């Protein structure tokens, strides 16, 4: 599978524009803010933008450490970053040590069983990279309990050296909400473990972690969302540059009278005379059906002629209907462009319109879009 395996721009309904220059600028800005090395989290095909172009651009800019979720993603990153350290967040599923060695990947070990399995593999003489050790300070998802981490430290057991631990890490549960008291608890719990395991480089900050007060940067930070232009400080102006733009085209326009029902199951009713545009993009393109705009609930929007115009009715598989009545005269025309992501419709606004997060918007997009990589 290749991220370039997408339709020819002349044949596609919509075009995704990915600004690799902005990606690199965001990575540099986060590293400068942290005052330490910033890695890049490129799981889920680099949050949908394409793992090969993202890793290639970031490597060229000096990024040496990457995080992916799956071994398969690690193998793809390795193919374009032969010298990088590549951590696999999902860690060791039983029997996968060989895959790690083959692609020179580093597991993020998330349990005592994983630690033992990896240590045994290395002791058997495998030429394996150092691993990371994940301590769970809030999520109850992956990672050793803090107490287990402290015990390991106290014993300073041979298993830690046998496993070759090159990084100690934990993950924030609600860093995008700086008022959440869980942040301070996690910062303190992680500080205790990091102090108990001196000499092992540590990593705590995700994107939003870079903007938390009183949070040490440690040796390495792990931004994902903010690299791709997501706002790490929701409710405040977005400090990141936009990376992703999505544009589709108008197929057809029509005028409807008051009382006209629109779309599947007639879930939206015109309150007056309206001008509607049908655009060539729908939920099969990764735009969530939850962005439907009905009589009972608001939904997504598109920019037409500089004006934000609401969707009307249910998002269809391949089509969305947009109320372009307020668009400037002459801007909503057959074949004309509409912007789904870009300008006022940043990732967080689009996510809110679809009752989800900008993260899910990013990672869902793009199977049928033409892709244009620009900015480098
Ligand atoms: C996804 C992930 C990150 C990146 O988080 P963002 O909020 O996208 O910056 C960092 N660390 C871990 C463990 C993750 O799973």
Image: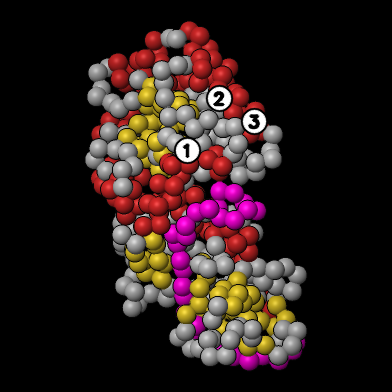
Question: 10 Å neighbourhood of mark 3: few (<14), some, or many (≥20)?
Answer: some
Colouring scheme, one of rainbow, by chain, secondary structure, one colour: secondary structure
Q: Nearer the viewer, mark 1 or mark 2?
A: 1
Q: Which residue is mark 2?
A: 190
Q: Is residue 242 magenta?
A: yes
Asked if the beta carbon under badge 3 is closer than 8 A to the nearest atom of ligand 1, the reply is no
| Residue at the top extreme of this rendering | 155
| Residue drawn where x is 33% and y is 58% of the image | 3
Label 2 to label 3, Cα distance in Å?
10 Å
Would you place residue 162 above or below residue 274 in this image?
above
Element marked by disc 1: helix
Whole-percent x, y for residue 274 in the image: 67, 88
Whole-percent x, y for residue 355 in the image: 64, 59
Question: 10 Å neighbourhood of mark 1: few (<14), some, or many (≥20)?
Answer: many
| Residue drawn where x is 28% and y is 48% of the image | 60
Quadrant where the N terminus lies?
bottom left
The answer to which of marks 2 and 3 sits earlier in the sequence is: 3
Element marked by disc 3: helix
Label 3 to label 1, Cα distance in Å?
18 Å
Element marked by disc 2: helix
Q: Tell me, for residue 184, which label it has, or none.
A: 3
| Residue drawn where x is 47% and y is 29% of the image | 218
Residue 219: name its quadrant: top left
The answer to which of marks 1 and 2 sits earlier in the sequence is: 1
Asked if the beta carbon under badge 1 is closer than 8 A to the nearest atom of ligand 1, the reply is no
Labelled pair 2, 3 in contact (Cβ < 8 Å): no
Whole-percent x, y for residue 375 in the image: 34, 62
Q: Which residue is mark 1?
A: 34
Q: Which residues are magenta?
A: 231-259
């Amino acid at each position: 599978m290749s991220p370039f395996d997408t339709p020819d721009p002349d044949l596609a309904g919509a075009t995704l524009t990915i600004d690799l220059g902005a990606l690199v600028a965001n990575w540099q800005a986060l590293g400068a803010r942290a005052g330490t090395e910033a890695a890049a989290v490129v799981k889920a095909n680099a949050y949908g933008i394409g793992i090969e172009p993202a890793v290639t651009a970031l490597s060229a800019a000096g990024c040496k450490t990457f995080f992916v979720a799956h071994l398969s993603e690690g193998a793809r990153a390795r193919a374009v970053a032969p010298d990088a350290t590549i951590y696999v967040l999902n860690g060791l599923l039983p029997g996968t040590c060989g895959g790690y060695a083959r692609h020179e990947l580093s597991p993020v070990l998330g349990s005592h069983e994983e630690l033992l399995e990896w240590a045994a593999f290395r002791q058997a003489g495998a030429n394996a990279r150092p691993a990371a050790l994940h301590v769970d300070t809030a999520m109850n998802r992956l990672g050793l309990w803090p107490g287990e981490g402290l015990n390991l430290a106290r014993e300073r057991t041979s298993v830690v050296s046998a496993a070759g631990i090159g990084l100690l890490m934990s993950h924030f549960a609600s860093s995008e909400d700086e008022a959440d008291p869980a942040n301070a608890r996690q910062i303190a719990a992680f500080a205790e473990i990091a102090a108990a395991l001196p000499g092992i480089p540590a990593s705590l900050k995700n994107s939003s972690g870079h903007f938390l007060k009183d949070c040490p940067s440690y040796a390495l930070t792990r931004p994902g969302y903010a690299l791709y232009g997501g706002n790490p400080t929701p409710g405040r102006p977005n400090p990141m540059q936009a990376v992703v733009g999505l544009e589709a085209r108008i197929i057809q326009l029509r005028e409807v009278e008051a009382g006209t029902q629109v779309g599947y199951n007639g879930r939206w009713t015109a309150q007056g005379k309206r001008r509607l545009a049908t655009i060539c993009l729908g939920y099969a393109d990764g735009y969530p059906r939850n962005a439907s705009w009905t009589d009972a609930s608001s939904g997504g929007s598109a920019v037409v002629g500089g004006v934000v115009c609401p969707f009307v009715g249910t998002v269809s598989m391949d089509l969305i209907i947009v109320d372009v009545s307020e668009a400037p005269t002459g801007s909503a025309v057959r074949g004309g462009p509409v912007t789904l992501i870009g300008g006022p419709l940043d990732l967080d606004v689009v996510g809110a319109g679809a009752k989800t997060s900008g993260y899910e918007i990013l990672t869902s997009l793009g199977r049928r879009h033409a892709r244009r990589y620009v900015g480098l």
